[in-house]
């Protein structure tokens, strides 16, 4: 199968399919650069595949309906790098796996959760970061986990202004003396 042969370190560097670009424009850029390279097989993992994969995962995170387009982009890039003989299949798999691990780690820790009812990020009313908790209920079993040892709801003023009721009271005279 094409692209699955083991690396042969006795062969010199090759511009592969990019030699056609040199020939087309009448320059010697890729041919001289790749031929003089001391590291012929320094392409594991493939950063072509890693960049394309992490871009596709991130854009799919933001625009789930366009996921087939982004997956098609990754497949096209995989095919083209193998067709131009710049990477073996294992380079591409390694790069994509590396990108997937980094993306899913970052998504669980740092990326804001997508709000499906909003079309654009600047429409968000609030930001929640990381993966949503497995249990999303508000029953008594989750009360200790959510509240902890805090009694913050009991601390503070009990006046009508702080409670938000804004009911009229006379200054200096409690409402319950009537």
Image (cartoon, rainbow, N blue to C red):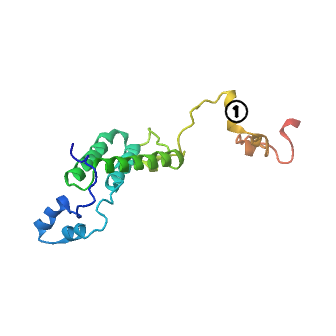
Position of 21 relative to 75 (above/below): below
| Residue at 83% in and 39% down | 175
| Residue at 37% in and 40% down | 64
Whole-percent x, y for residue 105 in the image = 49, 47
Image quadrant holding the C terminus, namely top right
Image quadrant holding the N terminus, namely top left
| Residue at 66% in and 27% down | 139
- Furthest residue in direction right, as rendered: 177
Q: For numbered disc 1, what is the local secondary structure?
A: helix
152 horizontally vs 76: left or right: right
| Residue at 37% in and 49% down | 94
Whole-percent x, y for residue 154 in the image = 79, 40
Front position in the image: 137 or 156: 137
User: Counting other residues with Cα less than 10 Å from the Cα at mark 1, is it few (<14), some (14-19), or many (20 or more)?
Assistant: few
| Figure quadrant of residue 168 | top right
Whole-percent x, y for residue 125 in the image = 52, 46
Q: Name the residue carrying label 1.
A: 143
Q: Is residue 172 visible?
A: yes
Whole-percent x, y for residue 100 in the image = 41, 46
137 horizontally vs 20: left or right: right
Q: Is residue 126 visible?
A: no
- Furthest residue in direction front, as rendered: 10
| Figure quadrant of residue 177 | top right
99 horizontally vs 125: left or right: left
Position of 69 relative to 21 (above/below): above
């Amino acid at each position: 199968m094409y692209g699955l042969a083991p690396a042969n370190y006795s062969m010199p560097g090759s511009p592969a399919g990019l030699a056609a670009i040199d020939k087309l424009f009448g320059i010697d850029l890729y041919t001289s650069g790749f031929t003089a390279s001391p590291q012929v097989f320094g392409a594991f993992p493939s950063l072509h595949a890693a960049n394309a994969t992490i871009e596709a995962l991130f854009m799919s995170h933001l625009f789930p309906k366009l996921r087939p387009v982004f997956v098609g982009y990754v497949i096209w890039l995989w095919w083209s790098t193998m067709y131009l003989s710049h990477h073996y299949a294992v380079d591409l798999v390694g790069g994509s796996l590396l990108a997937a691990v980094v993306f899913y780690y970052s998504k669980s820790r740092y990326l804001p959760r997508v709000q499906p009812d909003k079309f654009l990020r600047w429409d968000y009313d609030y930001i929640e970061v990381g993966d949503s908790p497995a249990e999303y209920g508000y029953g008594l079993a989750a009360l200790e986990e959510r509240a902890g040892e805090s009694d913050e709801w009991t601390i503070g003023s009990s006046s009508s202004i702080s409670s938000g009721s804004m009911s009229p009271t006379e200054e200096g005279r409690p409402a319950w003396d009537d």
